[in-house]
């Protein structure tokens, strides 16, 4: 419906405009009934609807409507399947239309800096490229149904400890390369209707007050068109928020903050044009939803439950397997562990879904008349030894062909609101797994957890299947995967370290409660483990299958690339096994120019390909200059040095199958600030100043009695002199009698610097 939003705003009172910038209640925006402005509802997601019809809260404490719980982001991102999350988003969008929800609060793309973050189950990955691509696809799916999304939490919210007040101390390069790219990709590729700012401060400034973050970066650089809302209760200075680019405060403030906005406009400290801008952005989204309203939409919970089952089948990761999986038809199998009968399939907090139904792996096995016996073995809600339960589990394992232990983290171990204190699973579970594995060589462990756990028994068991928090269909999906009716095809979207002490931010996480220093910089996840050459339990991108895959014929569309070009990477992938399966082709790039401070490789492309036995398909991926670049703060832009780069294609970050070289050429030049402190080596490496330095060195060699080409002496003497000259600041040339002050000023001027004075 065509309408003039600016004209509508012009008819509003100052109080009405200020009122539109905060919630009516916990979940609704305010209406202006006399002008036809409706109140619309938002609801928690991201993997299901948590629409509360009664008493509202933001931590999942009170009941919400019966809805379908899809796998959490820890699982769906492990699918490495953008088409899958897009379809899931479409389903969620249809559900929102049926329930008259205008905005679904998700996806959550905060980087998994530490495996201890209590909300990691809701976050996508340790890798910003993967998180950005998956988030954009999810957003396009939901919003294709006329429903908005709210990508969160912007930004650097990577822990629960004091998340509402703590300051994330992180340098700009790290922000730009690790913590902002998922948001950037989502905004540029999918335009979420809203962005939710985080609670925390960034370098001392609350996200809600941060004009650099909300206006300069989000809008001016990335082109965001929607409105920014707070996380619930994240408001800081309400008037500064309007100036910074924060539009909607959630939930309601009882009118207190509305009054502050009105007072600031009246006393001249807030330009009313900024308030009008905020209202316009909110109304654009509100009316976009109303114009696309579908009152006839149907929430078919049974059909969507089956979709949740199918999604989880694509997400589970087979971590290891000696051939015991898939289970043979007719095998006598002991199911051990309470999660077999009552799976843990979602996390705690604001994303907690009141699920329409849940089918366990035990229920699914019984429905198919499988030869399964069941022993609880240990309590699933606490860490408490049960000697009788352990003994019964060992006895059941001995009399079976295979023992399958359903283990994982109890609800209380990971939730919104607090962080984990350890990567360990409950000791009672570890003890049972060790005892059963000692009694039964064909022991399989099925994991239900939202983030990595230490697995001290990994070498002693035959197979491990990671289900993550797989949604309400996890039991049926697990049954199909264990018994070979589906082939595992998930890949880890995060590294499983051997122990907590190996993690990049071990010494800094979660800080002192007031600040948390991101001292590891860009070395997060696999970037860190590879640079340190630290062994890990399972690497980023790892995941096995019931078939095998071969890679061949890696070809680049060109041998060179420049600032504006694109490079197409093609590789043939063949299913070399005997059953249908899906491989995830992973493309990494390595900087071979010698640039300091760059990770050994970074993910810059991926594709999931389905293959019948013996079938070959060609996968094509594209690279640009941005994919080779790092963020240079001085330049204020992305930069890749001219020189050699390596393109790597493989099965996982630690399983590269093929490589190729490409030469990159850039026209960008880094800022050059020449002074007496600048070293000769710096100038010699810069093409703008190298000729001047070469001439100076020749004159110096002649002055010292050389032949004009090199300094005299033994090889070691020459190496020493060369190293000293490379590291020598220009001002020191006078100290060694190589030039006087006038000559030094002339050299600095010739290199573009200012005289020493």
Image: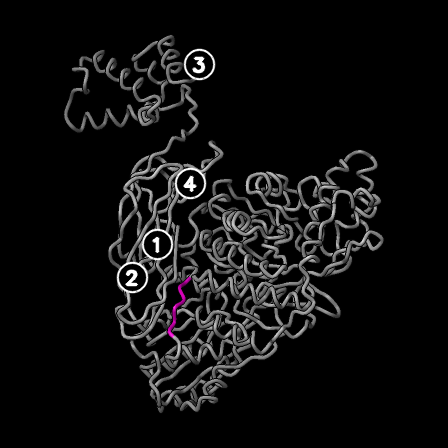
**Between disc 1 and disc 4, whose residue precedes?**
1
Q: Which residue is mark 2?
A: 573
Q: Which residue is mark 1?
A: 620
Name the residue at 42% across, 71% down: 466
**Between disc 2 and disc 3, whose residue precedes?**
2
**1 or 3: mark nearer the eye:** 1
Name the residue at 39% across, 36% down: 563
SS for callout 3: loop
Q: Which residue is mark 3?
A: 756
**In the image, residue 163 above or below residue 263:** below
SS for callout 1: strand
**Between disc 2 and disc 4, whose residue precedes?**
2
Q: Which residue is mark 4?
A: 630
Q: Main secondary structure of the magenta part?
A: loop
Q: Check whether the beta carbons of the residues at disc 3 and disc 4 lie within 8 A of each other.
A: no
**What stretch of residues is rendered in magenta?**
487-492
Residue nearest the viewer, comparing 226 with 503: 226
């Amino acid at each position: 419906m065509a309408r003039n939003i600016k004209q509508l705003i012009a008819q509003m009172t100052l109080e009405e405009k200020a009122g539109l910038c905060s919630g009516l209640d916990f979940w609704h925006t305010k209406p202006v009934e006399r002008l036809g402005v409706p109140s619309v509802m938002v609801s928690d997601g991201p993997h299901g609807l948590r629409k509360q019809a009664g008493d509202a809260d933001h931590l999942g404490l009170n009941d919400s409507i019966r809805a379908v719980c899809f796998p959490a982001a820890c699982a769906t991102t492990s699918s490495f399947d953008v088409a899958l999350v897009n379809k899931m988003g479409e389903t969620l969008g249809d559900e929102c239309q049926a329930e008259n929800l205008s905005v679904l609060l998700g996806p959550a793309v905060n980087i998994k800096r530490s495996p201890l973050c209590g909300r990691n189950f809701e976050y996508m990955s340790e890798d910003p490229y993967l998180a950005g691509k998956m988030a954009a696809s999810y957003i396009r799916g939901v919003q294709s149904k006329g429903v908005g999304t709210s990508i969160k939490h912007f930004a650097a919210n990577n822990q629960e400890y004091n998340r509402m007040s703590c300051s994330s101390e992180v340098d700009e390069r790290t922000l730009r390369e690790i913590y902002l790219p998922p948001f950037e990709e989502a905004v540029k590729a999918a335009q979420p209707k809203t962005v939710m700012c985080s609670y925390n401060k960034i370098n001392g400034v609350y996200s809600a007050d941060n004009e650099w973050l909300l206006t300069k970066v989000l809008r001016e650089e990335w082109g965001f068109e929607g409105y920014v809302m707070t996380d619930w209760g994240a408001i800081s200075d309400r008037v500064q928020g309007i100036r910074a680019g924060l539009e909607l405060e959630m939930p309601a403030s009882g009118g207190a903050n509305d009054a502050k906005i009105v007072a600031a406009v009246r006393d001249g400290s807030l330009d009313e044009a900024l308030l009008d801008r905020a209202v316009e952005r909110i109304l654009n989204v509100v009316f976009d939803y109303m114009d696309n309203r579908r009152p006839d939409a149907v929430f078919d919970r049974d059909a969507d439950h089956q979709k949740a089952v199918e999604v989880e089948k694509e997400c589970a990761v087979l971590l290891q397997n000696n051939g015991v999986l898939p289970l043979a038809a007719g095998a006598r199998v002991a199911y051990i562990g309470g999660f077999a009968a009552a799976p843990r399939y979602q996390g705690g907090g604001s994303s907690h879904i009141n699920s329409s139904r849940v089918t366990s792996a035990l229920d699914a096995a019984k429905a198919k008349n499988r030869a399964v016996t069941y022993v609880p073995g240990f309590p699933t809600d606490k860490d408490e030894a049960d000697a009788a339960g352990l003994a019964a589990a060992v006895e059941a394992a001995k009399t079976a062909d295979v023992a399958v232990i359903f283990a994982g983290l109890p609800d209380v171990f990971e939730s919104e609101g607090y962080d984990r204190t350890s990567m360990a699973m409950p000791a009672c579970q570890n003890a049972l797994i060790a005892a059963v594995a000692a009694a039964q060589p064909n022991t399989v462990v099925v994991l239900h957890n939202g983030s990595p756990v230490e697995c001290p028994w990994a070498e002693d068991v035959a197979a491990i299947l990671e289900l993550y928090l797989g949604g309400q269909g996890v039991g049926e999906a697990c049954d199909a995967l264990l018994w070979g009716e589906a082939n595992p095809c998930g890949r880890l979207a995060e590294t499983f370290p051997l122990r907590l002490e190996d993690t990049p931010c071990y010494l800094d996480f979660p800080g002192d409660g007031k600040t948390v220093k991101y001292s590891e910089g860009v070395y997060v996840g696999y970037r860190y483990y590879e640079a340190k050459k630290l062994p890990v339990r399972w690497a980023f991108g790892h995941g096995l299958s019931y078939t095998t895959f071969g890679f061949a014929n890696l070809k680049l569309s060109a041998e060179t690339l420049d600032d504006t070009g694109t490079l197409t990477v093609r590789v043939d992938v063949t299913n070399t096994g005997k059953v249908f399966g899906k491989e995830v082709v992973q493309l990494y790039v390595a900087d071979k120019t010698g640039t300091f401070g760059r990770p050994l490789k970074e993910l810059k492309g991926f594709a999931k390909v389905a293959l019948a036995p013996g079938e070959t398909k060609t996968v094509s991926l594209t690279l640009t200059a941005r994919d080779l670049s790092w963020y240079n703060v001085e330049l204020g832009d992305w930069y890749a040095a001219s020189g050699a780069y390596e393109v790597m294609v493989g099965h996982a970050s630690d399983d590269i199958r093929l490589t190729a070289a490409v030469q990159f050429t850039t026209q960008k030049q880094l800022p050059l600030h020449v002074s007496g402190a600048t070293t000769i080596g710096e100038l010699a490496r810069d093409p703008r100043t190298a000729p001047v330095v070469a001439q100076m060195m020749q004159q110096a060699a002649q002055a010292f009695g050389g032949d004009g080409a090199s300094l005299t002496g033994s090889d070691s003497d020459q190496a020493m002199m060369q190293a000293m000259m490379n590291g020598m600041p220009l001002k020191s040339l006078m100290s060694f009698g190589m030039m006087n002050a006038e000559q030094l000023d002339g050299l600095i001027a010739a290199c573009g610097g200012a005289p020493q004075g």
